[in-house]
């Protein structure tokens, strides 16, 4: 049995997209809020090609392939922690019959406060 081929007058050509075009499509999909499947169907882009290019370009997929409106990341301020003393500070004051011994990170401030009190005439 012999088969015949029929020329319908049209041929399907694949659209060849470069890296820049794929970067743009991936960014558009993310901004659109659509799922990847819906976006690809609307644009006539093969879903498998979209996934391969997204992986190749390092664009990680989002959960559900879209970010729900109002959900995302918020910036959090980072506070620097107080510097920790590298050495132990210890101060001893002998004032007449009094002996005052202070140690720790706040020793300097405490000694300043004591000296100011002692130096002030009554």
Image (cartoon, grey):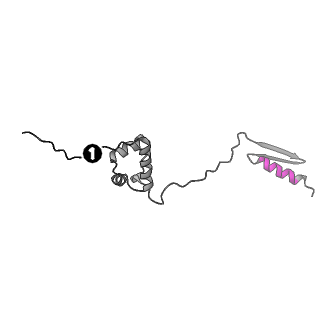
Extreme residue in the left direction = 1
Q: Which residue lies furthest to the right in this view?
A: 121
Look at mark 1 in the image and give the residue it sits on: 12
For residue 37, side relative to residue 74 (left or right): left
Q: Give the range drawn in magenta.
A: 107-117
SS assignment at label 1:
loop
Residue extending furthest toward the front: 9
Residue sitting at x 36%, y 42%: 16
Q: Is residue 120 left or right of residue 91?
A: right
Q: Which quadrant of the figure contains the N terminus?
A: top left
What residue sits 77% from the left and 42% below the top? 90
Report x, y in % for residue 61.
Answer: 41, 48
- Is 13 magenta? The answer is no
Q: Is residue 74 left or right of residue 115?
A: left
Residue situated in front as seen by the camera: 100 or 121: 121
Q: Quadrant of residue 92?
A: top right
Q: How crowded is mark 1: few (under 14 residues within 10 Å), some or many (20 or more)?
A: few
Frontmost residue, 20 versus 66: 20
Q: Is the magenta stretch mostly helix, strand or loop?
A: helix
The residue shown at (38%, 43%) is 17
């Amino acid at each position: 049995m012999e088969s015949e081929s029929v020329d319908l007058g049209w041929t399907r050509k694949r659209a060849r997209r470069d890296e820049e075009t794929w970067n743009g499509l991936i960014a558009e999909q993310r901004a659109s809020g659509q799922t990847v499947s819906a976006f690809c169907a609307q644009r006539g882009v093969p879903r498998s090609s979209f996934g391969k290019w997204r992986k190749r370009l390092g664009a990680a997929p989002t959960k559900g392939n879209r970010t729900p409106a109002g959900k995302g990341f918020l910036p959090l301020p980072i506070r620097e922690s107080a510097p920790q003393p590298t050495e132990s500070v210890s101060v001893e004051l002998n004032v007449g019959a009094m002996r005052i011994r202070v140690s720790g990170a706040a020793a300097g401030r405490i000694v300043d406060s004591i000296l100011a009190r002692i130096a002030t005439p009554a």
